[in-house]
Image (cartoon, rainbow, N blue to C red):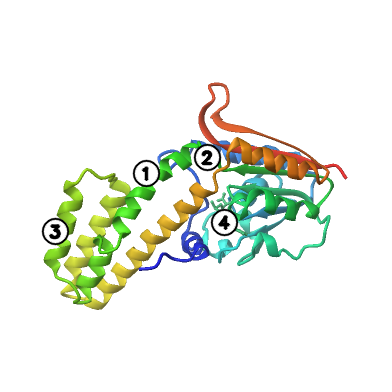
Amino acid sequence: MNQPQNTNAWSLYWSEDRLYSCVAQSSDEDQKALNKLWQDFSQELEPNSRVLDLATGNGAVADALLSVNNTLQVDAVDKASIDPKKIVTEHGNLLNVNFHSDTDIFDLSFKPTTFNAITSQFGIEYAGLTEASARVMPYLKVAGRFQFVVHHVQSGIILSSRNKIIEFEQLTQQSGILETLIKVLGGKSEFAQLETLGQDYLKQDLIRSEQISGQVFVGIERIINGFASNPKESIELAVAMDLRVRSELTRLVQLTAAGQTSDSMTTWLETVSAMGIDAMFSPLYLDPIKQDYLLGWLATGVRCK
Ligand SMILES: C[S@@+](CC[C@H](N)C(=O)[O-])C[C@H]1O[C@@H](n2cnc3c(N)ncnc32)[C@H](O)[C@@H]1O
């Protein structure tokens, strides 16, 4: 079975009522810290400033910026199909954002020197940090500023994603549990085979979590139990679950690939500096004093000429 296209995985993700993506799921401390960072950035912008938010998802950065400076004029782009005004509830700030769905960072049609600020949170690096930065910097006005929060190869989110990837790969492997479930429902495999696979999966010394394998097993049980009374619905549910799991895998593989090393950040710095940008980068910690829990890299700068 094929993995979903990269962009489709994000479109599926953003079709649910959620504002955030790359945060630890057990606590909202990291998102609070990031929100504060964006609010501080926003408060330094003049009223009515034009802001371009790159790879916006469902508009988390735009929401944070507007929450403290509601005169900003924000354009927010993403390559995925997004419709945050319709999908995300209780985020009134998003109503003022000009979202551009299905829009690649490399295909923007804004005029040069349009924006007072450019922002990105775990976004621009998915397009290739250095190349995409070189492409977007001309959209900044002279004295315009940018702030990017970028994945760090050693960040908490990337380290925790590695185990999740292994678990998703086990579930989606060829002739594995999800593929066999669909075959059983379609009459192309025996139920006993699925049962054996399930038992082996639970017995083996594999990475398993309640959040991923636990939920998939609960889903499979429901689907099997409902099959006799509504086979069509069971097959649809199984296909949808399979797609969700494969999409998550695709997303997490992209996420880990987007992690930047100190060397790649240095290359980025050299490139943007050569364009007349006064830039810098540093590791961003949840607790900067104890240097505890690495969130990512913070990359900031001003266009000088
Ligand atoms: C981790 S999400 C971040 C979303 C949002 N900034 C946030 O913090 O919630 C990464 C986003 O990058 C988008 N993306 C990846 N490559 C892109 C590109 N070339 N142009 C525009 N968006 C892109 C994906 O569709 C996805 O929504």
Q: Label 2 vs label 3: CA separation?
A: 38 Å
- Which mark is first along the chain, 3 or 1? 1
What amino acid does circle 4 point to? Answer: Gly
Instruction: Tell me the quadrant of the picture where the N terminus can be found.
Output: bottom left
Using the numbered discs, state the Cα–Cα distance from disc 4 to disc 1 in whole angstroms.
24 Å
Q: How far apart are marks 2 and 1 (CA)?
A: 14 Å
Tell me, yes or no, whether the two marked residues, 4 and 3, touch with CB atoms within 8 Å.
no
Which comes before the other along the chain, label 4 or label 2?
4
- Please, what secondary structure does the residue beneath circle 4 have? loop
Task: Give the alpha-carbon distance from disc 4 to disc 3, as whole Å.
Answer: 40 Å
User: Do the residues under discs 4 and 2 have CB atoms within 8 angstroms?
Assistant: no
Binning the other alpha carbons within 10 Å of mark 3 as few (below 14), some (14 to 19) or many (20 upward) gives few
Classify mark 4 as within 8 Å of ligand 1 or not, answering yes or no. yes
- For marks 4 and 3 on the same chain, the one whose residue lies earlier in the sequence: 4
**Disc 1 target residue:** 163
Of the numbered discs 2 and 1, the one sitting upstream in the chain is: 2
* Circle 2 residue: 153
Helix, strand or loop under label 2? loop
Residue at horizontal 42 percent and vertical 60 percent from the top: 247
Mark 1 and mark 3: span between their CA atoms? 24 Å
Where does label 4 land, which residue? 57
State which mark lies toward you, 4 or 2.
Answer: 2
The residue pinned by badge 3 equals 196
Q: What element carries label 3?
A: helix
